[in-house]
Image (tube, helix red, strand yellow):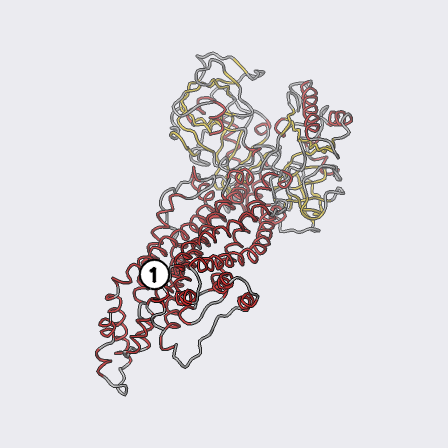
């Protein structure tokens, strides 16, 4: 070792006198030669440390970079999937197929009419095929409406535009009339799998749910694939049905040689995307003044992004914490290596090594290890990429496999490498022997709290443990005490914030009123298309005084030119969507908006908007004042534009100008709302409200059944509707233990960091431990001192970090809930946080066992031999 150190000082420097200094260039070359020589000569002794640094940076940094890249990939997963299907920007469904039966000629006429609208780039269509289905092995043809609808396109919609995504089996051949695809929901209803055959027969007028058909006239088709429509990946529960059996263009053309359909769907791609969708809607309303359902892709994408965002945020948070933990562990390893070279540096300095030589000693090896670790981190992140994205879009994600998000990987790796290199250089400069002369008084890190504990007469082991935890130490024993305490506080802060956010998310999922379902039951007619007779509602409620009810009508209205799903309700209604700001409807010139719609219109409370019902001729304009912001429920017409959490409006139904122009408000002989909300008063039980709702639905269905079949509401049925969850809540329910797993991951990283810190602290304080042992401390007392040190570090984290974490979690949840349009009601899980604090203390005690044993075995003679 001595020979290596002597040889480290260049011969030129040894041969010259102090009055003959080296030239600047020669000094630089000498420093580099010394650094390389020291790196080569000390590799056998320090190589394990460099390898450990490579693994820490590579594996920990790779996990951090991979998690952040996964967060970005997850966040954009639905948008990437949607783009891969060549999506429509707008889907148009005219009620009744545009006023009459749809056949190939009329379907083509409407396609050509839409294609001439300004801003329309391309349009295709598909139609309902009015078919009954015989399942495999069945001899009975069944009409599965309203659950399953057989649809087909002659121009390729669902094949080249809004492409059907197959998750099992294969795509059907568009030219083969004997192949079909089915959605996952339809496959569950029909009980089919790829390769099985089903039979289709035309539905004759007046057929019931079950119908017989001649097997000779039936079409036998094979199910080639099961999958999803692009709108089904993330959807409100109300949109689950109807779902589709998708026929090929060849089958559709053959089918419609002798039949027509009552339903048509037009997929429109618009130049400028969502920007010009309202203009196309207005052009359609002026050209075809029929009651029309619109589906806007931008709204569906917004709902999907909001439903996926918590998982992306969780991954991003985990990545950031993993990065911080990796940096702290790597910095501790650099400090350990620097302390191990302290004696060598003093010898080199005494032999005449320049300050530059002592500063650069070990930097070459550490720098190489950090750079190699950074490259390894990039490789680990890429290796982890096939595990992402997570969430509902993963089964249909088009770019599954290895991926490199160079924005994250390059910038993240450079930031980590730059941080560690900078820390290594700074640490080397501060630890250089020429900065620590005998004449300089070294700064101490005394703690007044530790001194107070000493003066209080506490047990010696407890007092020493508090001192180890709070005092930075002096000279070679000085350690990053404040950083350790800061890390403990941050760890408990993040765990508390994560638990608060996660439990608030669980509370949102468990409380329907927080996402708009502010009633016990709802009764609707004909999937929202028909009425619940008003006279029936009044008769039933007159016999149930403990139940209050309010009715709403569904409509698509234009607010300042934007198509918005609306609930038409009576001002002062006793049951209405929950408010997050302002007040409910009190007059006919007011309206309440969802938070997302308010932002879309660039309005605020007190502003006015212009409202029009487009199919009216001419469109009737009404000026309304925004008086409230509500959490909108996910209800409405299943295949049309409907309200959802944050999206929609509540508009007064008794506005005369609107009532005159809005067709769905009045059906001769059976007028009434499309849906009725019911809620118990006072002590009325949910079961009592449920009985009232079932009675209302049964009585309304009997009234509607008496209407002539050719009337506007003949044959309709009323049903009791269970809680309808928006897409965000559907996905949040599937997240399961994600918040808990995130908290566990953070705790694991904190545990590892604390354990390494305790071991490093014992190594740094060998001299102090030896002195304590020499003056009478027993091994058990030394172990107890380390235990107290760990407990104090954990205790500071609990006392400071937990309250800050709870406050941060509540604040973050409030921001998040307001963004998605939910009622912001954060929940503080006191029991979980208390358990986490107890676990932190227990882990601290457990982690102190090994360093405590090391402290107890510290040999006093060898540790003090240099004194």
Q: Is residue 325 above or below residue 191?
A: below
As drawn, which residue projects farthest toward the bottom? 19
Which residue bears the numbered disc 1?
370
Residue under the image location 47 percent in, 21 percent down: 257
Q: Give the x, y percent position of residue 373.
A: 33, 57
Q: In screen coordinates, is 76 left or right of 93?
A: left
Residue under the image location 30 percent in, 62 percent down: 368
Q: Is residue 471 above or below residue 389?
A: below
Q: Quadrant of the C terminus?
A: bottom left
53 or 513, which is in the foreground?
Answer: 53
Q: Quadrant of the N terminus?
A: bottom left
The quarter holding residue 863 reads bottom left
Q: In screen coordinates, is 774 left or right of 616?
A: left
Q: Residues within 10 Å of mark 1 (few under 14, many from 20)?
A: many
Q: Give the x, y percent position of residue 393.
A: 46, 40
Q: Give the x, y percent position of residue 675.
A: 67, 31
Q: Is residue 371 above or below residue 270?
A: below
Total residue callouts = 1
The quarter holding residue 694 reads top right
Q: In screen coordinates, is 613 left or right of 175?
A: right
């Amino acid at each position: 070792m001595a020979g290596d150190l002597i040889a480290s000082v260049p011969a030129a420097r040894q041969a010259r006198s102090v009055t003959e200094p080296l030239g600047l260039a020669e000094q630089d070359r000498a420093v580099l030669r010394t650094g390389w020589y020291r790196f080569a000569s000390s590799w056998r002794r320090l190589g394990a440390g460099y390898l450990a640094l490579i693994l820490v940076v590579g594996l920990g940094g790779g996990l951090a970079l991979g998690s952040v890249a996964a967060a970005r990939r997850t966040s954009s997963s639905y948008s990437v999937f949607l783009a891969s299907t060549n999506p429509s920007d707008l889907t148009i469904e005219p009620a009744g197929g545009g006023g009459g039966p749809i056949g190939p000629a009329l379907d083509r006429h409407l396609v050509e009419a839409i294609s001439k609208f300004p801003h329309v780039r391309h349009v295709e269509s598909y139609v309902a095929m009015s078919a009954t289905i015989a399942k495999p092995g069945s001899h009975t043809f069944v009409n599965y409406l309203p659950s399953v609808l057989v649809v087909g396109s002659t121009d390729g919609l669902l094949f080249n535009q809004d492409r059907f995504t197959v998750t099992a089996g294969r795509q059907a051949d568009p030219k083969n009339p004997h192949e079909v695809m089915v959605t996952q929901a339809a496959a569950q209803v029909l009980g089919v799998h790829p390769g099985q055959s089903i039979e289709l027969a035309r539905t004759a007028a007046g057929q019931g749910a079950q119908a017989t058909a001649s097997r000779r006239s039936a079409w036998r088709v094979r199910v080639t694939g099961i999958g999803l429509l692009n709108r089904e990946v993330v959807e409100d529960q109300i949109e689950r049905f109807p779902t589709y059996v998708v026929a090929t263009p060849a089958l559709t053309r053959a089918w419609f040689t002798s039949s027509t359909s009552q339903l048509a769907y037009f997929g429109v791609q618009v130049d400028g995307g969502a920007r010009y969708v309202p203009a196309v809607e207005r052009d359609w309303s002026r050209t075809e003044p029929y009651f029309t359902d619109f589906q806007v892709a931008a709204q569906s994408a917004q709902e999907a992004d909001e439903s996926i965002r918590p998982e992306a945020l969780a991954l991003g948070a985990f990545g950031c914490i993993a990065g911080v933990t990796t940096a702290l562990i790597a910095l501790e390893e650099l400090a350990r290596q620097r302390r191990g070279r302290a004696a060598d540096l003093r010898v080199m300095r005494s032999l005449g090594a320049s300050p530059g030589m002592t500063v650069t000693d070990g930097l070459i090896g550490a720098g190489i290890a950090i750079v190699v670790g950074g490259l390894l981190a990039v490789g680990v992140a890429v290796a982890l990429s096939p595990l992402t994205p997570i969430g509902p879009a993963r089964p249909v994600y088009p770019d599954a496999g290895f991926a490199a998000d160079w924005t994250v990987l390059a910038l993240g790796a450079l930031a980590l490498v730059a941080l560690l290199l900078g820390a290594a250089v700074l640490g080397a400069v501060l630890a250089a022997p020429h900065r620590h002369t005998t004449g300089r008084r070294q700064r101490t890190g005394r703690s007044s709290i530790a001194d107070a504990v000493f003066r209080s007469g506490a047990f010696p082991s407890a007092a020493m443990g508090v001192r180890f935890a709070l005092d930075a130490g002096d000279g070679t024993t000085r350690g990053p005490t404040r950083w350790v305490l800061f890390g403990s506080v941050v760890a408990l802060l993040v765990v508390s914030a994560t638990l608060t956010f996660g439990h608030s998310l669980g509370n949102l999922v468990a409380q329907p009123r927080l996402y708009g379902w502010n009633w016990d039951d709802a009764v609707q007619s004909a999937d929202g298309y028909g009425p619940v007779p008003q006279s029936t509602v009044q008769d039933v409620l007159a016999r149930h005084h403990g139940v209050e009810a309010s009715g709403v009508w569904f409509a698509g209205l234009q607010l300042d030119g934007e198509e918005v799903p609306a609930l038409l309700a009576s001002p002062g209604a006793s049951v209405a969507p929950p408010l997050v700001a302002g007040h409910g409807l009190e007059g006919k010139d007011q309206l309440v908006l969802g938070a997302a719609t308010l932002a879309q219109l660039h309005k605020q409370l007190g502003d006015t908007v212009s409202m029009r019902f487009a199919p009216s001729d001419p469109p009737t304009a009404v000026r309304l004042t925004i008086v409230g912001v509500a959490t909108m429920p996910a209800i409405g017409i299943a295949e049309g534009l409907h309200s959802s959490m944050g999206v929609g409006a509540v508009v007064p139904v008794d506005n005369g100008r609107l009532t005159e122009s809005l067709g769905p408000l009045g059906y001769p002989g059976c007028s009434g709302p499309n849906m009725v909300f019911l809620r118990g008063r006072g002590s009325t039980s949910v079961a009592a409200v449920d009985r009232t709702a079932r009675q209302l639905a049964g009585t309304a269905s009997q009234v509607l059944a008496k209407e002539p079949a050719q009337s506007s509401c003949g044959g309709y049925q009323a049903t009791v509707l269970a809680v309808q969850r928006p897409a965000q809540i559907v996905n949040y329910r599937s997240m399961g233990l994600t918040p808990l797993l995130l908290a566990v991951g953070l705790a694991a990283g904190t545990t590892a960091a604390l354990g390494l810190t305790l071991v490093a602290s014992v190594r740094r304080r060998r001299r102090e431990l030896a002195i304590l042992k020499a003056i009478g401390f027993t091994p058990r007392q030394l172990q107890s001192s380390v235990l107290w040190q760990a407990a104090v570090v954990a205790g500071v984290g609990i006392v400071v970090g937990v309250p800050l974490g709870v406050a941060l979690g509540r604040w973050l949840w409030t921001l998040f809930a307001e963004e998605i349009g939910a009622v912001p009601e954060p929940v503080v899980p006191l029991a979980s946080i208390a358990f986490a604090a107890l676990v932190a203390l227990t882990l601290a005690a457990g982690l102190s066992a090994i360093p405590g044993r090391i402290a107890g075995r510290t040999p006093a003679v060898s540790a003090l031999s240099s004194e």
